[in-house]
Image (cartoon, rainbow, N blue to C red):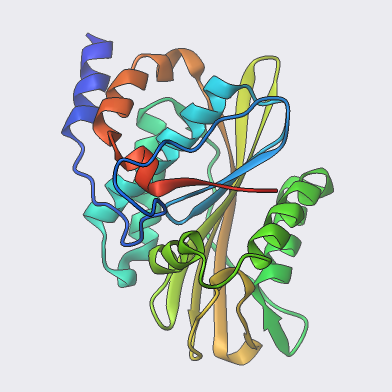
Amino acid sequence: MITQDLVGYVSDLNLQAPEGRFATMRGAETAPIKEGEDQAFLADKSLVSFVSEVNGQNRQDVLNSTLLAQMAANKQFPNEADLLDWYRTFIEVLTKIGWEIEAGEFSTFESSKDAFEVQDSIIDILTTAFGASFIPVILKVLDSIKNLSNKDHKIIAFEKNTHSLTKGCFQIALADETNNTVAMQLGTFLLTSENKIKQILFFKSEKDKTRLQYTSRRGTLNSDAYALVRNAVLQKLGTNISAFIAEVAI
């Protein structure tokens, strides 16, 4: 009965596709899942990284569940004025399909400098929340994205999915695995500025013209619970997996 309820829950979810597609054409192949090496992906408005220890099935489960939850939140709260409600819906969907998420509230980042830089703020926040051991992988991924051309279709799509002219939301996640249990460190960032946002991850502004809200939480995937809905998630997402999940070479 529980399995039927969970499958029914996934099947009944209403989804809204992100504005930007990472695939350049319909019918493109799903991003390749690797094992034994660090790997990073864009998934809607999230940047999801994996350390080498995470196995292939867990990588797929993290990416697919994250995309499903985002698309469900997109449907319920498409307006940029409702970003906090978008985030709450995202977390609610994850918890219902097998994730155990720690409690957390949003805080406002206070820059000690007059010049505000999103990338530096991300590193400061995630170092404090999760420890320095996770930062080298995140830095490697951010550097890889920074080196991509701003005409790269993946970057163009990511920018469409994360922000309007002056307001945006993005997520930075890092998954690791210990004793066959996968956990995800998740940082969610809400950015509001008087200045025009172009590249949200590398946005710079005067600190009195920009506000960055954030929350940092750890989630653990109950693999047994997720296994009950894995096929339902795959069926629900369908071709969205290849359209809205893309690997970032690192």
Q: Residue at x 68, y 76 (%)?
A: 110
Locate residue 185, reporting x and y percent.
63, 42
- Residue 64 in the image: above or below residue 47: above
Locate residue 156, reporting x and y percent.
45, 67
Count of numbered marks: 0
- Residue 23 in the image: above or below residue 242: below
Does residue 42 appear anywhere in the picture?
yes
Corner quadrant of residue 208:
bottom right
Corner quadrant of residue 162:
bottom left
Q: Is residue 82 left or right of residue 176?
A: left
Q: Residue at x 37, y 42 (%)?
A: 28
30 or 128: nearer the eye? 30
Q: Residue furthest top?
A: 1
93 or 36: nearer the eye? 36
- Residue 80 in the image: above or below residue 188: below
Q: Residue at x 56, y 84 (%)?
A: 210
Locate residue 134, reporting x and y percent.
77, 45
Q: Is residue 23 left or right of residue 183?
A: left
Quarter containing the N terminus: top left
Q: Is residue 200 left or right of residue 161?
A: right
